[in-house]
Structures are given as structure tokens and as C-alpha cells.
Amino acid sequence: MIIVTVHHWCKPGMVEQARERIDSNGDEMAKWKGFLFRHRIEKADEPQRVSTVSGWSDEPSYRAYQSAKKAKDAAANAVSPYERVQNEVFAVQHSHSSAA
């Protein structure tokens, strides 16, 4: 399993547009093979940053989604609400979870 964190620093006045885009991308992501979960998270003291934490069964599944998303974004030629984006992929080495 891999965990992907993405930090989106939003352009001024575009936080809500960024949230909508992130949530829409999550809806599309959920249809892909290997997708496990995605959470949109925010810090109260950084209102211009919107982050996500996603889980995938394997890296090839995530990379396939990323390739398709990039092609779709390029074709749409939409204005990005982000000043910058930082993406990191982590391999899960050990897990703890509640059975509840």
C-alpha cells in the first residue's frame, strides 16, 4: 500500500474553488482500480493551504490515475487555483488500526 500526501497552496481568493476541484478529483479518483481512501484536510492557521491524504493499494494504480488526470487537465485547459503543489508518495511499512 502507498499513502500520498498533496499540499495545495491556493492563489488568493481561490480557496473555495480549490476545495471544489480537489473534491471533484476525489470523486473521480474513487472510481479507479487500487483506490482505497482520500481525506481533504486543512490547518486553521494556514487558510491558503488545502491538503489531501490518499491511500492506494499499489503505486502503479496511483500512477495510472495520475497519467489520466494530467491528460484530462491538459485537455480542459482550466485555470489552476494553486500557486504551487507538493506531492509525496510513501510506501507503507507497518500499520496500526482499530477494528471498531
Image: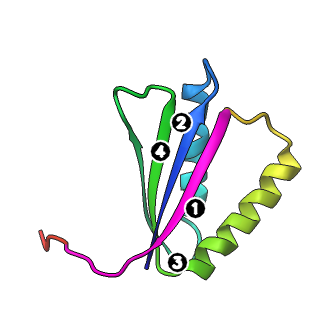
Distance between the alpha carbons at the discs numbered 3 and 1: 10 Å
Q: Which residue is mark 3?
A: 34
- The part of the image, by quadrant, that contains residue 71 is bottom right
The residue located at (67%, 32%) in the rendering is: 81
Crowd class of label 4 (few under 14; some 14 to 19; many from 20; radius 10 Å): some
Label drawn at residue 18: none
Q: Amino acid at mark 4?
A: Ser
* Image quadrant where one finds the N terminus: bottom left
Instruction: Using the numbered discs, state the Cα–Cα distance from disc 3 to disc 4 in whole angstroms.
Output: 21 Å
Location of the C terminus by quadrant is bottom left
Residue 43 position, x and y percent, is 36, 34
Instruction: Kindly state the secondary structure of the residue where label 3 is placed.
Output: loop
Q: Please name the residue that numbered disc 2 is placed on.
A: 19
Question: Mark number for residue 51?
Answer: 4
For label 2, count other residues whose C-alpha is less than 10 Å away and answer few (under 14), some (14-19) or many (20+): some
Drawn side of residue 94 relative to residue 16, left or right: left
Label 1, secondary structure: give it.
Answer: helix
Instruction: Read off the magenta span.
Output: 82-96
Please give the residue where the numbered disc 1 appears in the rendered image.
29
Sequence-first disc among 3 and 2: 2
Q: For the stretch drawn in magenta, what is the main secondary structure?
A: strand
Q: In front: mark 2 or mark 4?
A: 4
Q: Nearer the viewer, mark 3 or mark 4?
A: 4
